[in-house]
Amino acid sequence: MKLKFLGGVRTVTGSCFYMECNKLKFLIECGIYQGEGAEEVNKAAFDFDPEEIDYIFITHAHLDHSGVLPRVVKEGFRGRIITTSATRDLLELMLYDSAHIQESDAEWLTRKALRAGKPPVFPLYTTDDVRDVIPLIDVKKYGEIFHLGNGIKYRFLDAGHILGSGTIELWFQDNPKEKKIVFSGDIGKKGNPIVRDPLTPVKADFIVMESTYGNRLHKPLKESIDELLDAIKITFKKGGNVFIPSFAVGRTQDLLYILNSLVRGKRLYNINVYLDSPLAEEATKIYLAHPECFDEEATKRFTAEDFDDSIRLHFVQSVQESMAINKIKSGIIVIAGSGMCDGGRIKHHLKHNLWRPECSVIFVGFQGRGTLGRKIVDRAKVVNILGEEIAVRASIYTINGFSAHADQAELIEWLTFFKDSPDVFIVHGEEEVSILFSEIVNERFGLKTYVPEKGQVYEI
């Protein structure tokens, strides 16, 4: 079996792993690259021929794991895309949204280019390309073993990261002894709202494991909720608004759930929450349509009462409605994408409010290197937003207890369930984090660990 690391190595974005075994070729993940230099990376020639790929496995719907699917299909892939039911529904939503953004950005850049006498700019892919992706998706249930043929079989286990997320167990036999490789996907934090806790395989010969938070521990969720509550109260007392950059899928639904719980618990009163993301609104509906993924508490909550009957939740659709929010100077919470502030409506809200000392920005997720969110979190005094220099005077909070990723302790705990001594490939983490986590795993378990470089090939 040949395993080649094409993306998501020594970085937290663009996950893509190529495998070749028994005359079958397939990808695990097909993620878009986000951050500095993203356009160049995403438009570069593939390190594989899409027409030759038989299968693509997707662990979950976040674009850094799935966002290049339309381009792969556009360039000739006609195999099957294998994932879970909830991921399939989220994929359709997110890929169409991504394509709309690609088309809109290309149109704007083309107008600008033509005025400067330069050639037009073409989108990475279009909505027509996304339309070609959807019929290729095969939905599989958690826990059932399925056969690809040629001595290869696989199973999804609930990864507990977002709705529909999975860890993939893949058995292969290219010699008399069957072996198994596990792709962790993004491992969820225990106690995450709504979704179940992650399940862990117990045997493997090889593991490809994420390391996003391999260098740090999260605050307990209760402490993080208390910190969120204090930030909201302090901001309202100062006469400002709270802005929360949030990923449309996963983090937003968790936040709405938590804010509802705070109101039901009489810790907040009469709060107005503006969900300024049509994508997040549609994703929330998909969440509600998949109760099979809920944990016990969420199942009871959603069965007993409506999701949004405690907070005053305003769904913001049009651009005009979004612009009108900035006329409200105090007393509201605005949740908008993107989670790292590199796109979406949050950039406009930051442009109009980041300079206001009475306001607050609360970061509740990982901020990749080179993103606008990372610059703000790293205490930049001035940032460029939509071509304008904006002073950072608002209060900045980073509450990592809301992360949907396991922290270092939980990643280590995940590994303790394996009964054998698998080789471990450490991926999906910033370079220094992956190297550190690799050393910890080696010292703690005595396992062989590798931190692959992009393009590196292993024969296993």
Image: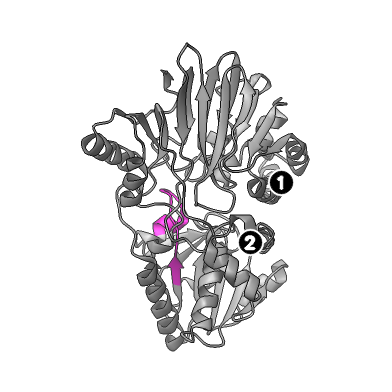
Examine the rendered structure and indicate whether residue 178 appears above or below residue 184: above
Dot 2 corresponds to which residue? Answer: 280
The picture quadrant where one finds residue 179 is top left
Answer with left or right where residue 228 lies relative to residue 241.
Answer: left
Q: Residue at x 58, y 77 (%)?
A: 273
Q: Is residue 351 visible?
A: no
Q: Residues within 10 Å of mark 1 (few under 14, many from 20)?
A: some
> Is residue 50 rendered magenta in the image?
no
Q: Quadrant of the C terminus?
A: top left
Please tell me whether residue 224 is drawn above or below residue 290 in the rendered image.
below
- Furthest toward the top, the residue is 175
**What percent of the width, then of the height, locates residue 344?**
60, 58
- Seen in the picture, residue 171 relative to 235 is either above or below; the reply is above
Classify mark 1: helix, strand or loop: helix
Identify the residue at horizontal 56%, vertical 63% (top origin).
Answer: 252
Q: Residues within 10 Å of mark 2 (few under 14, many from 20)?
A: many
Q: Secondary structure at mark 2?
A: helix
Magenta highlight range: 361-375
Q: Any mark on residue 103, and which?
A: 1
| Residue 188 position in % (x across, y down) | 45, 51
Question: How much space separates mark 2 and mark 1, taking CA atoms?
Answer: 20 Å
Q: Amino acid at mark 2?
A: Ala
Query: Which residue type carries mark 1?
Result: Glu
Please provide percent x and percent y for residue 223.
35, 71
Q: Residue at x 48, y 18 (%)?
A: 2
Q: Nearer the viewer, residue 211 or 24?
A: 24
Which of the two discs, 2 and 1, labels the residue nearer the N terminus?
A: 1
Looking at this view, is 370 or 280 the one in front? 280
Residue 9 in sight in this render? yes
